[in-house]
Every structure is written in structure tokens, then in C-alpha cells.
Image: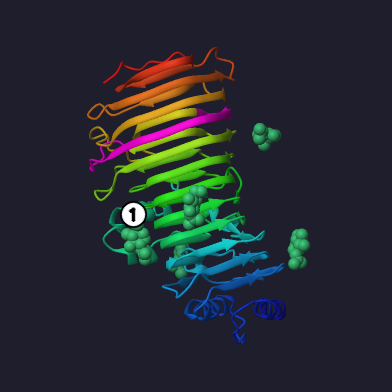
């Protein structure tokens, strides 16, 4: 215990502008009381985590509203307990109901996820956390508190946070997702590094639901799941200069399973590299989905694919774990999608996969200058289309298979 106590002594001493009594050796409690004083202070506050390793052995919640802007500077390493039970199977570090928060620094959030990854494998474990998460998201909009009853032991979560940003920290080996955002508006993420092994299940990099006006740039994400997951109700998101790999690419969805799912509208992904990922540009909607929603105005431009499994992949028959009911077609309408200057190498022969819904065919899909070569041994790359209307211009490798304008 001694090193923890002295670590927190150092933490308290270096806490710049708010003085607190640091008697407790429980890291979470110390942090929470520092936060409370900072939050109640008039005038802006800084909370500083200096160089060194600090064990933060429980889940911690930083809740507003706060009187003023708070800057959280992390230069050291915050270490999570390795047992997810120690953070009650919930998100480790939580920010809620806050405006004007800045998280910065050269430090690291180390989720120590290795022990919990075996719990995350839904293909083998029907009560796995991600299934709880899916059913939870279905009800989320009505009852926010449910989130705290489900499993989602992410490194850091933001809910009802506006006008804020993260700049420069590293998130390592989260137990599940690295950063989760729910009902977050006007939020910028720059210079962030996110790392977990390519075979660590459900370690999404950045995950968004019911968010708007999000900017992500100059960020490097390599995990065992989606680099960026864009879920229900996300509007106006701008992604640029992101490096993604290993991982499952930048995904819109999965969508359409829950009856309270909302539209996704306005996404731009520019100047981004996918390196060794299973997928690149991906949109997935559940087959036989019940919610009738629209995914529209998506722009992808200047995207390099390096040995990517499925560089362009629209899948409206998504069903990752059985049983798949196969009761009907997806009710999610995908429209106004523009892909410009997408180039590089595909690991599979099918480099462009556009499998849309029979009931709601994809509309106004525009392809401009696509150059994706097959790196495998099976000959030139190909495209597959189902129920997709649009147009193509410029270089087109593989040859497109769109159904003409609609
Ligand atoms: C913190 O550690 C980093 C990397 O080891 C070093 O570059 C930096 O100067 C240190 N900062 C302080 C205030 O000690
Ligand atoms: C956390 O999840 C594990 C695995 O599902 C479960 O056995 C354990 O009881 C849970 N612990 C808490 C504190 O909820
Ligand atoms: C946050 O922004 C959203 C969307 O603009 C707005 O509806 C909400 O009231 C804002 N919340 C706060 C606490 O300002
Ligand atoms: C986010 O970045 C955009 C574009 O650079 C900028 O206009 C906006 O003010 C930034 N917002 C925050 C909260 O930093
Ligand atoms: C792609 O990833 C490989 C393997 O990790 C690495 O050697 C290579 O430098 C990366 N290429 C780019 C352009 O980042």
C-alpha cells in the first residue's frame, strides 16, 4: 500500500490550483474529491497527473455541472485494476454533464485489459458484455441509468458532455472499448493514440452514439475491433488524418436492430490510412431490422488502403453471432454516399462490396477514382453489388457494378 499512498501524495501535491486533503489511499475517492473542489470553484481549474504511475483501482465518476472550465492534464500513467469486477464491470473513468472540459497531456490510460478479453468473446459466450450493450443501446434513449447496470468496462466514457476536447493522451489495452461517447456535442479529438492487440475482442477505439459536431484528427488507432464506431443518432462528424490498423476499420453501425435507433447523417472521412485492417470503409445494418431509419450524406475522400481485407464494405445483412433470424430485409435506407480517390491494396479479391437492402436499395452512391488492387493470388480485384443505385467517374479498378442512377 505504501507506494500507492506516496503516489497519491505526489498527485495531491502537484494538483495545481485546488487544494484538497489527501488522506485516503483509495485513488478513486481522492480523484473524486479533487474533482468536486475543482468543479465548484469559480475561475478555471487545472487537475494535474504528473509523471509516474498511479493506480486508480476503482471506477471513478467526474460529474458536472461545473461552474467553470476544467483542464485535466495527464502526463503520467493511470493504471486500471486488471479485474473488471474491481470497477464493477463498468466504465473506468467517467465524465458526465459537463461543458468546457479539456483533457490533455502526454500520459497514458492503461486499462490492463488482458485478463478480461476472454470475457468479451460473444461468439463463444452468449451472456457476453457486448450483447448486454446492444440490448442496452436499444433502451438507452429512454432510460440512461440502464448503462450502469450493464457491462461495458471501457477506459473512458463521456455522457452529456458539450464543447470539450481531448488532446494528446494515449489509451492502452482497454478491457472493452477505449473511449465511449453518448450524447456528446461539439467535441474535438486530436493527437490521440489508441493501442490494443489486433486479436483483443471488442476493444473499439472511439465509439459514438447520439452525438453531433465531432471532429477527430491526427489520431492513430490500432485495436482488435472498430477503430471508430459510429452508432445510432450521430450527425455531423468530421474525421481526418487518422491512421487505423490493426482493427476493423471505420464503421457506421451496426444499425437498425433496436426500435429506438436514430438516423446517421453527415460524415466526412478524409486523408486517412487503413493499414492491415479487416475492413476499411464499412457500413453495417442488421438484416430483418425493425427500425426504419436513414443513413445519409457520407463522404470518404483520399483514403489509402494497405493490405485491407474488405476495403469498401456495405453489408445490410449484418449478423455477427447466431442465431440469425433471416426474417426479412434491413429497413435502413442508405443514400447520398460519395467515395473519391480510394486507392491501395485489397487482401480479398472482392475489393468493393456494396450489398444493400432489397426493400430499401442504396440510392445516389457516387464513386470517383477508385483504384484498389488485389494483393492476393486470385487475379484482379472485383466488385459486388446488390440493390445499389448510383454513378461512377474517373479511374475505376475494380470495374464498378452500380445499377445506374436513381
Ligand atoms: C515526464 O516524462 C517525459 C518522458 O519520460 C519527459 O520527457 C518529461 O520531461 C517529464 N516531465 C517532467 C515534468 O518530469
Ligand atoms: C462482472 O462480470 C463477471 C462476468 O460476467 C461476473 O461474474 C461478476 O459477478 C461481475 N461483477 C460485478 C461486480 O458485477
Ligand atoms: C449540449 O448540446 C446539445 C446539442 O446542441 C443541447 O441540446 C444541450 O442542451 C447541451 N447541453 C448543455 C448542458 O449545454
Ligand atoms: C473543434 O474544431 C473545430 C474545427 O477546427 C473548431 O471550429 C471548434 O471550435 C472546435 N471545438 C472545440 C470544442 O474545441
Ligand atoms: C503498415 O503496417 C506495417 C505492419 O505493422 C508496418 O510495417 C508499415 O510501416 C505500415 N505502413 C504504413 C504506411 O504505415
Q: Decide if residue 266 is on the left or right side of residue 224.
A: left
Question: Overall secondary structure of the magenta stretch?
Answer: strand
Q: Quadrant of residue 360?
A: top left
Looking at the picture, how far across and down is residue 109, in whole percent? 61, 60
Q: Which residue is mark 1?
A: 137
CA neighbours of label 1 inside 10 A, class few (<14), some (14 to 19), many (20+) = many
As helix, strand or loop, the secondary structure at mark 1 comes to helix
> How many numbered discs, if any?
1
Q: Is residue 123 visible?
A: no
Q: Decide if residue 299 is on the left or right side of residue 70.
A: left
The verdict on residue 135 being magenta is: no
User: Measuring 47% from the left and 61% from the top, which residue is drawn there?
Assistant: 157
The stretch in magenta equals 286-310
Colour logic: rainbow
User: Measuring 50% from the left and 33% from the top, which residue is drawn there?
Assistant: 280
Q: Quadrant of the C terminus?
A: top left
Q: Quadrant of residue 22?
A: bottom right
Looking at the picture, how far across and down is residue 286, in whole percent? 32, 38
Q: Decide if residue 51 is on the left or right side of residue 391.
A: right
Amino acid at each position: 500500500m505504501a507506494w500507492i499512498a506516496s503516489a497519491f501524495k505526489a498527485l495531491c501535491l502537484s494538483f495545481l490550483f485546488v487544494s484538497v486533503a489527501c488522506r485516503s489511499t483509495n485513488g478513486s475517492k481522492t480523484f473524486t474529491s479533487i474533482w468536486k473542489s475543482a468543479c465548484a470553484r469559480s475561475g478555471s481549474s487545472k487537475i494535474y497527473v504528473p509523471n509516474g504511475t498511479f493506480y486508480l483501482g476503482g471506477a471513478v465518476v467526474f460529474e458536472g455541472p461545473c461552474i467553470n472550465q476544467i483542464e485535466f492534464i495527464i502526463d503520467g500513467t493511470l493504471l486500471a485494476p486488471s479485474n473488471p469486477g474491481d470497477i464493477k464491470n463498468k466504465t473506468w473513468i467517467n465524465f458526465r454533464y459537463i461543458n468546457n472540459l479539456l483533457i490533455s497531456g502526454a500520459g497514458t490510460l492503461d486499462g490492463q485489459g488482458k485478463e478480461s478479453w476472454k470475457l468479451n468473446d460473444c461468439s463463444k459466450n452468449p451472456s457476453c458484455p457486448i450483447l448486454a450493450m446492444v440490448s442496452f443501446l436499444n433502451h438507452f434513449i429512454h432510460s440512461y441509468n440502464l448503462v450502469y447496470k450493464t457491462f461495458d468496462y471501457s477506459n473512458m466514457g463521456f455522457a452529456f458532455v458539450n464543447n470539450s476536447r481531448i488532446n494528446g493522451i494515449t489509451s492502452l489495452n482497454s478491457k472493452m472499448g477505449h473511449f465511449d461517447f453518448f450524447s456528446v456535442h461539439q467535441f474535438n479529438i486530436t493527437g490521440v493514440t489508441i493501442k490494443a492487440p489486433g486479436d483483443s475482442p471488442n476493444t473499439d477505439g472511439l465509439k459514438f452514439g447520439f452525438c453531433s459536431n465531432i471532429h477527430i484528427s491526427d489520431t492513430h488507432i490500432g485495436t482488435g475491433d472498430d477503430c471508430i464506431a459510429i452508432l445510432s443518432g450521430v450527425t455531423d462528424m468530421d474525421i481526418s488524418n487518422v491512421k487505423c490498423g490493426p482493427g476493423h476499420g471505420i464503421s457506421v453501425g451496426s444499425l437498425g436492430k433496436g426500435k429506438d435507433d436514430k438516423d446517421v447523417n453527415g460524415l466526412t472521412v478524409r486523408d486517412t490510412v487503413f493499414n492491415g485492417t479487416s475492413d476499411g470503409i464499412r457500413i453495417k445494418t442488421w438484416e430483418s431490422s425493425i427500425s426504419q431509419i436513414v443513413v445519409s450524406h457520407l463522404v470518404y475522400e483520399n483514403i489509402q488502403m494497405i493490405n485491407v481485407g474488405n476495403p469498401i464494405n456495405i453489408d445490410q445483412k449484418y449478423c455477427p453471432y447466431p442465431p440469425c433470424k433471416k426474417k426479412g430485409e434491413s429497413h435502413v435506407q442508405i443514400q447520398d454516399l460519395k467515395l473519391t480517390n480510394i486507392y491501395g491494396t485489397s487482401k480479398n479479391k472482392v475489393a468493393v462490396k456494396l450489398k444493400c437492402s432489397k426493400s430499401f436499395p442504396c440510392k445516389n452512391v457516387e464513386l470517383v477514382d477508385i483504384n484498389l488492387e488485389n494483393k492476393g493470388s486470385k487475379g484482379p480485384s472485383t466488385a459486388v453489388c446488390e440493390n445499389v443505385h448510383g454513378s461512377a467517374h474517373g479511374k475505376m479498378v475494380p470495374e464498378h457494378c452500380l445499377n445506374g442512377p436513381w
